[in-house]
Amino acid sequence: MKSLKLLLVLSVAISFTFCSSSDSLKVIPKDTNVVAVVDFYSLIKKGQLDEITELKIFKGIKKEIKNENKKLSKFVSNLTDDPTLTGLKFTSDIFMFLIDEGNDQKYTAFSMEINDDEKFAEFLENAMEKLGLDCDIENEENYNYALSTSEAIWGWDEDKLVLLIATNYSSRKNLEDTIETIMELDEEDQISENEEFVNFHKNKKDISLWVSSNLMKSSEFAGMYDEITKEIDYDLEDNYASFFINFDDDNISLKAKFTPNSEIQELMDENDWSNSFNDDLLKNFPNKNNLVGSISINPMAFYNNIEQQDGKEFESFKSEFEEELGFELKELFESFKGNAVFSLYGFENIEYTYMGYGYGFNKNKAKLLETKHTIDNAGTLSSEQKRLLNQGKTIQTPKYPRNSINIKNVLDRGGNVEEAIEQNMAVIWYEGGREYGRYVEKTKKEYLPLMGMSMDLNGNKMMKKLVKKMSENNNNEIKKRGDYYETKFENRYPLFFAFNEEVCFITNDEKSIKKFKDGGYDDSLSNSEMSDNMFYSYLNLDLDDYSKEFEKKMKDGMSRSDEKLFEIWNELAKSVEFKVEDNYSFEMTFNTKESDTNTLNNIITLLDDNYKKLSL
């Protein structure tokens, strides 16, 4: 813990001239499969960490160090006053990389540049002494090294520094040999000779990570790699993934890029799912949205890819699908153009009816009486019972609890319950059949999200088939309401849908479904990001844009500490977006509320202002 605090304080020591060099790359082997890069200068500048000594958190740590170790505290103060005493070049990048040359040579390594190797040696000796650790510096012809613990070794020369940490017990014995190897790497054996890494490094951001698929061939994953190569007939070597985190003035972004080898590239080109986005789908949603998602892919390319990859399993699934629904799965894919938009655009208190638990009539467990007794034998009927009879329902008779009646024979002739009572008609009687279950119609008002999904069609023939099949198989009644249909989701929540030759729209908002026939909203959703990406999603994180009722429900059940974190979060968060432009890249962006400083400084300041709250 003390060494961690010391390293935090060391980050204060920066100079204010930027230089870009690659001396610290000279210790990274060419065949290294994982490299992380931290642009330390950029983080210092964006976070305004040259003023770190003014932060409450920093002052708290200094006070704690002073209470534990006064010598260490004085050492830290000296470094704070003059960070050049470390001999380090804090304007250079910091690299982290993995070395795996067998079970007895597994290391995590860090490298950075040095301004003054003699100052660094003095600093290292002093630091280790204050931390109670031994530090014997050995001088080789081209470099120096020091074992600080049994599992870590420092190596440095006039330009660069490496910290090598053994990741298992067996590797400790080879620390000195490995530091010699990487400190004296020939130029052709260095990572800078790897073209893919060089391209990655040119595009680095504040924090970057480069990973090669060759990592799977290392001793750690060798068994898994062998199993995978037995299953697939593709070359898995020399594929690369790059990840970039950047702190901008109003957001934090994470970008990822995949660079395949030629064989994988050819395979991906053959399975191109790209499609042209249909902007007309956006017309079915209001402009203000809390959550939006879109997809734009070629459905038949997707279908053909699954058919090619899954073989017999897919054929079995297709047969089951056709047997269940009565048409081919391919026909279903052909009926869609491949674009869809989902949106959650508000919250409302919605009143709905559903079947709750209570006693009701089960025809399968009742005995139909051969004689149709007159309706007066049932006793006096309430207005609710009359209403249910007019709906064709079967009710329990007030006079004989073991018997039930309905008036379907009267309804079939165009009559009703009033006529049946007035003329004392014979009606249908049952004995028994009463049981406990979902038989009681109940009404409830609930605060629910308003949402919908819109997708484009290749004609409406398939939708008509699906509606017919749903009507046959669905226990929920599907009602035609003029230009749209109404049913229930999970036997309780209202659900509406409508379609024409080009678009299908599904929603739980009756106002939106009624606008469908007229082409949707005048002030409709617009978002160019959907047109530019295969997949896109957006979530509004700004609680100020939501109702007080929503905020109250969010905080229900939160502890006091959770509420504090929630309030801090709301001071920062605005929205989050996720984009997939093509098969090779994606981007996630966390957008923050307006501020006069960079997002990183905004986060640091916010945490520092709430330091005491977070410590409780």
Image (cartoon, helix red, strand yellow):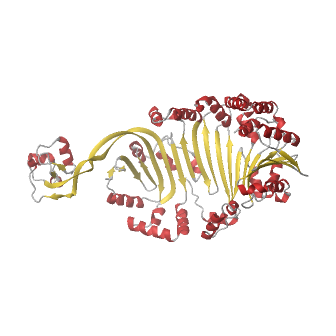
For image coordinates 16% across by 51% down, the residue present is 404
Q: Residue 458 appears at what percent x and percent y?
A: 47, 59
Question: What is the quadrant of the C terminus in the image?
Answer: top right
Tell me the quarter of the picture where residue 320 sits: bottom left
For image coordinates 80% across by 39% down, the residue present is 129
Nearer the observer, 273 or 21: 21
Tell me the quarter of the picture where residue 236 sits: bottom right
On the question of residue 99 being in view, the answer is no
Please, which residue is most extreme toward the right here?
141
Residue 200 vs 597, above or below: the answer is: below
Left or right of residue 373, residue 138 in this image: right
On the question of residue 468 being in view, the answer is yes
Left or right of residue 211, residue 554 in this image: left
Q: Residue 398 appears at what percent x and percent y?
A: 14, 45
Residue 33 vs 111, above or below: the answer is: below
Q: Residue 412 appears at what percent x and percent y?
A: 18, 55
Question: What is the quadrant of the N terminus in the image?
Answer: top right
For image coordinates 55% across by 67% down, the residue present is 309
The count of marks equals: 0
Nearer the observer, 314 or 269: 314
For image coordinates 57% across by 37% down, the residue present is 574
Q: Residue 492 appears at what percent x and percent y?
A: 34, 47
Please, which residue is most extreme toward the bottom here?
312
Tell me the quarter of the picture where residue 98 sits: bottom right
Nearer the observer, 203 or 97: 97
